[in-house]
Amino acid sequence: MKLFYSPGACSVGIHVILEELGRPFEPVRVSTRDGSNRKPEYLAINPKAKVPALMRDDGTVLTEFPVIAWWLARSNPQAALIPADLDGEARAMEWMDYLCGTVHPQGFTRQFRADRFAKDEADQPRVIAQGKAAAEEYLALVDSRLAGDPWLLASGYSVADAALFFLENWAAGRAGMTLPPRLAKHLAAMKARPAVQRALAREAV
């Protein structure tokens, strides 16, 4: 398998999952900062120009964090990275959809890529402020809904925690935010996992 990733992006969560599985894979750096994601050779792999993308052993490609995470978990059931029961699996997918589809773009892309939301530079500080306020609101909600201790699901650690990790890591680092207490505990528990440490070392984050 090949994982196409951009250092420090949401793809670090997929890195974490692959490290948890212990499956061999080739990391391929595709920086969104220098525009590598929009070069023809990458667009041939993922026309959406997004990371992460996972090229499987048969040459087919999966895109979008929740789908890649779900496929990796379901195709490696021995790792127990997603609940085996239907309701638990649905809850994991529900969290990943919210974290990747709402919290990520509205809370953090607005802070880090304000130019996507305001072409006029004078408007960008307002967009950044909106993003920070949204991130604080969203993270407070997540903090109040953690069902496990310290994991998102009552059943324990899952791929949803890898999705939460990349966001709270951004919040506490790049965004300079103070995490709510339960999320701070979650982040500490994630950073204590050997798989997370290996993923961060691979990406040199």
Image (cartoon, rainbow, N blue to C red):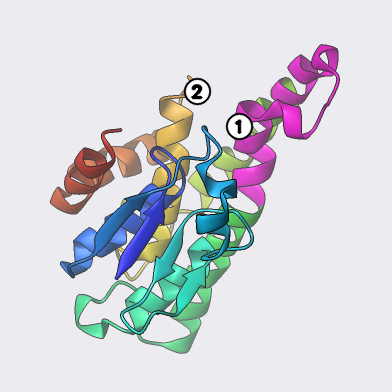
Say what amino acid the circle numbered 1 marks. Glu
Name the residue type under label 2: Met
Hey, which quadrant is residue 137 in on the image? top right
Residue pictured at 41% horizontal, 78% vertical? 71
Instruction: Say which quadrant the N terminus sits in.
Output: bottom left
Instruction: Decide: is 94 above or below 140.
Output: below
Residue at (55% x, 65% y) in the render:
44
Query: Which x, y percent locates residue 15?
Result: 31, 55
Q: Mark 1 points at which residue?
A: 136
- Check disc 2 and report the residue beneath it: 177
Region of the chain picked out in magenta, as a range? 102-128
Q: How crowded is mark 1: few (under 14 residues within 10 Å), some or many (20 or more)?
A: some
Residue 145 is labelled as none
- Where is residue 56, by image quadrant? bottom left
Taking the magenta stretch, the answer to whether it contains residue 153 is no
- Decide which of tag 1 and tag 2 comes sooner along the chain: 1
Q: In this view, does 189 lie to the left or right of 110?
A: left
Q: Nearer the viewer, residue 11 or 76?
A: 11
Q: Which residue is drawn at 35% across and 75% down?
A: 72
Q: For mark 2, does the 10 Å Cα neighbourhood hold few (<14), some (14 to 19), or many (20 or more) residues?
A: some
Q: Position of residue 139 (x, y in %)?
A: 55, 40
In what quadrant of the picture does the C terminus appear? top left
Q: What element carries label 2?
A: loop
